[in-house]
Amino acid sequence: MERNLEGKTCIVTGAARGIGKALAIKYAEKGANIILIDINKENVEATAREIEEGLGVRVLPLVVDVTSSQEISSALEEIEAQFTKIDVLANCAGISTSKLLIDLEEEDWDRVFNVNLKAIYLLSKGVAKNMIKNEVKDGKIVSISSQASKIGELGNGPYCASKAGVNSLTQVLALELAQYGIAVNAVCPGFVDTEMLQDVFLKRSVIEGKAPEEYEMMLTSQVPLGKLAKPEEIAEFMLFLSSEKANYITGTSMTIAGGKTLI
């Protein structure tokens, strides 16, 4: 197996499960040192053990509230102390809420925006400073957006709006960091078979007046390829965007949705 990330240091947020975990494993398979960031201590430490035991790379699990600038600063200080430079940041942490906007509380809106958008700003800012200081060659920042950033979804307002913000933030970061050779991109997955999506089936089906199984079938039927994506399929494309093969790609928000949206 080609280990083309040997010696590089990659940060993955939302690394305890889903796409974040799948991506962390792929980075490790390519030889990178991995920093796993998540709010769930038990799960992030379990992921760290799995990677260490199976792939033999350095792994640092950190329990961090990514909406807290203080916790992010402390985490980055620890990462710098252990690894010095950061080569790749993968922003995979994200949450949603299943409510109509007229039923949504202000704290629901703020929580989704803080995790999905503010955290990417805070982490990208801190990591970019590290990359610039250490003169990292071809640094990469890649974030998970969503097809929901391009097509509104009933009962998913703050998620849709926050992910649209991710796309715009990606463009601005790409413009501002290009002079340092740092490429910034986002991926916009469609329906991915994760715990988060299963929770969506359970909760948003109520809004639609359907059983969870019926709602899942309805959403899947809207995908031309007729199936959900696997976390590993999204992670594989994020891996590409994190590699030297994507050095000339920046400022994009690429959709991976089985044809659900052709935007």
Image (tube, helix red, strand yellow):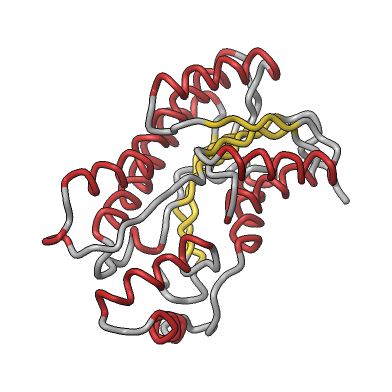
Above-or-below relation of 51 to 138: below
The percent position of residue 221, horizontal first and vertical second, equals 44, 86
How many labels sit on residues?
Answer: 0
Above-or-below relation of 110 to 33: below
Q: Residue furthest right?
A: 1
Query: 108 or 83, which is in the foreground?
Result: 108
Query: 127 or 97, which is in the foreground?
Result: 97
Please give left or right for residue 89 compared with residue 94 in the image: right
Please give left or right for residue 105 compared with residue 192 in the image: left
The C terminus, quarter of image: bottom left
Above-or-below relation of 181 to 248: above
Please give left or right for residue 217 compared with residue 9 in the image: left
The residue located at (56%, 41%) in the rendering is 90
Name the quadrant containing residue 68. Answer: top left
The percent position of residue 85, horizontal first and vertical second, equals 65, 20
The residue located at (62%, 20%) in the rendering is 79
The residue located at (59%, 52%) in the rendering is 17
Q: Residue furthest front?
A: 42
Please give left or right for residue 9 compared with residue 253 in the image: right
The percent position of residue 35, horizontal first and vertical second, equals 65, 32
Name the quadrant containing residue 261. Answer: bottom left
Q: Residue furthest left?
A: 102
The percent position of residue 167, horizontal first and vertical second, equals 37, 48
The residue located at (45%, 44%) in the rendering is 251
